[in-house]
Amino acid sequence: MSEELTQKVLAVIASTQRIPVERVTIESTFEELGIDSMDGVNILFALENEFNINIPDEEAKSIRTVRQMVEGIGKLVAGGENTPAVAS
């Protein structure tokens, strides 16, 4: 995953949650950041708009960390929308 993609995802999460971007790291969990399921939906919409992708609902439900989010977005951007967002 590229550093540019990672930084964009971190920035979208920080902006959506109104938290300092310095607080969001690749190792952060959504729980640590205080992100609940409704926040997660808002983040997904923002990421879909930012990267012009469609994140499958079933895949999105299993994302619990920033790393999983970055990896999933990376796969969707690189491989098109039919690629699963999260590797099993």
Image (cartoon, grey):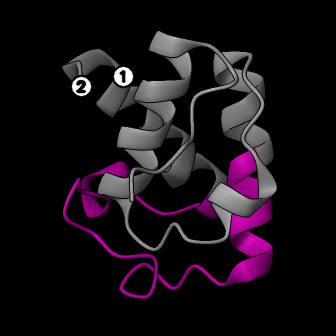
Residue 8 in picture, x, y percent from top left: 43, 27
Q: Quadrant of residue 81?
A: top right
Q: Which sits in the foreground, 78 or 9?
A: 78
Span shown in magenta: 17-44
Q: Residue at image x 45%, y 76%?
A: 30
| Residue 82 image-quadrant placement | top right
Q: Which residue is mark 2?
A: 1
The amino acid type of the residue labelled 2 equals Met
Kindly identify which numbered label has been placed on residue 5.
1
- Residue 27 location, x and y as percent? 19, 64
x then y, percent, for residue 48: 74, 31
Element at label 2: loop
Q: Relative to the observer, which residue lies in front, 24 or 54?
A: 54
| 76 within the magenta span | no
Q: Quadrant of the N terminus?
A: top left
Q: Is residue 67 left or right of residue 83?
A: left
Q: Which mark is residue 42?
A: none
Residue type, label 1: Leu
Residue at x 57% of width, y 40% of height: 84
Would you say the residues marked 1 and 2 are in contact, meaning their CB atoms lie under 8 Å apart? yes
Q: Position of residue 72 (x, y in %)?
A: 46, 41
Residue 61 lies left or right of residue 84; in this view the side is right
How many numbered callouts? 2
Q: Secondary structure at mark 1?
A: helix
Tell me: residue 2, above or below residue 26.
above
Q: Is residue 60 visible?
A: yes
Residue placed most toward the observer, 20 or 4: 4
Disc 1 to disc 2, how far (Cα)? 7 Å
Q: Is residue 42 above or below residue 35?
A: above
Q: Quadrant of the C terminus?
A: bottom left
